[in-house]
Image (tube, grey):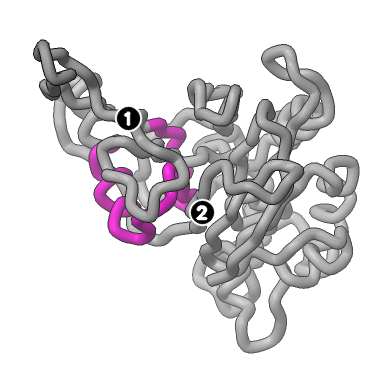
Amino acid sequence: MEIISKIVPVNFNLFLFGDTHIGNSHVTYKGIQKAIDMIGSEYSGLRENYAIHMGDVTECIYMNDPRFRPVDGTVVGTLDSEKEEAVKILKPIRSRLITILKGNHEDKMWAVSNPTKQICSELKVPYGSYSCRISFQDKRGNLLFKGFFAHGRKQISSTADDPRRREENMRLILKRHLKDLAGDCVLMAKGDTHKLLICDPSPRLYLRDTGTEIQDAYTEAEYTDRYIHPDDRWYVNSGSFMRLQIVGKESYAERAELPPVELGFAIVRFRDRKIEGIDKVTL
């Protein structure tokens, strides 16, 4: 766990992207480049863009891993070449990267190295560890909001037949995974599952009085409170860039009989000191 502070304007975009798996033949490098280009340009009327890499930057599958199968082309590089490629890809946005999280793939290397920390060192980007809390502050040092970001481990799935019910079930599972891990964070996100999910706040109707009449109102988060109700927070599962199937090769996700998922990432639109919305960008 790391705690990070970041000075930001009161209007900005926050890109949440990860599970780039650099070094795997099933990765869409065009998709990664699209994310890099968008971070470096204008989005939704603003050029004030920041980004968090949610982990699994590189594939980090070594020879003693059962998923290591260079014969069918799943692993296309060495550990060193993967790190070099990651630095090269992320370098254009290093001034916009708030942090890079360590994923479960990099964590497999714990006995010999920490590839994520090495990449962060090369790029001069704060190391996010497996999970981190980030305090977003204005230029005067006043707290705007806090966010909790983790690579994650628990999988998200639903066996519901109806696609709408399946999607809603997965959003609720995402919320259940994250809500107890930080009580004062209005934005909570994880990676790992390769799913691209957004669970927005669920305002509840209540009644209040002005002293002379009864009024109705809806619950809303106070971003700087010591405790924010779980129903008033935003939750994100940040997607991935790894395709399930390509002709002539096998992926370990394919061998595990996993279903297809939307490739892409999420963009948090922060306007006038509030989260205006979160967009899904699919590839």
Q: How packed is label 1: few (under 14 Cα within 10 Å), some, or many (20 or more)?
A: some
Tell me if residue 253 can be seen: no
> As rendered, which of 207 and 231 lies closer to the eye?
207
Residue on which the image places disc 2:
149
Q: Position of residue 203 (x, y in %)?
A: 25, 25
Residue on which the image places disc 1:
220
Q: Please, is residue 80 above or below residue 29 in the view?
A: below
At 38% from the left and 58% from the top, the residue drawn is 182
Q: What residue type is labelled 1?
A: Glu
Q: Please, is residue 111 above or below residue 93 in the view?
A: below
What residue span does the magenta drawing correspond to?
A: 170-198
Q: Which of marks 2 and 1 is in front?
A: 1
Q: Position of residue 270 (x, y in %)?
A: 59, 28
Q: Position of residue 69 (x, y in %)?
A: 60, 62
Location of residue 180 (image quadrant): bottom left
Q: Is residue 157 left or right of residue 55?
A: left
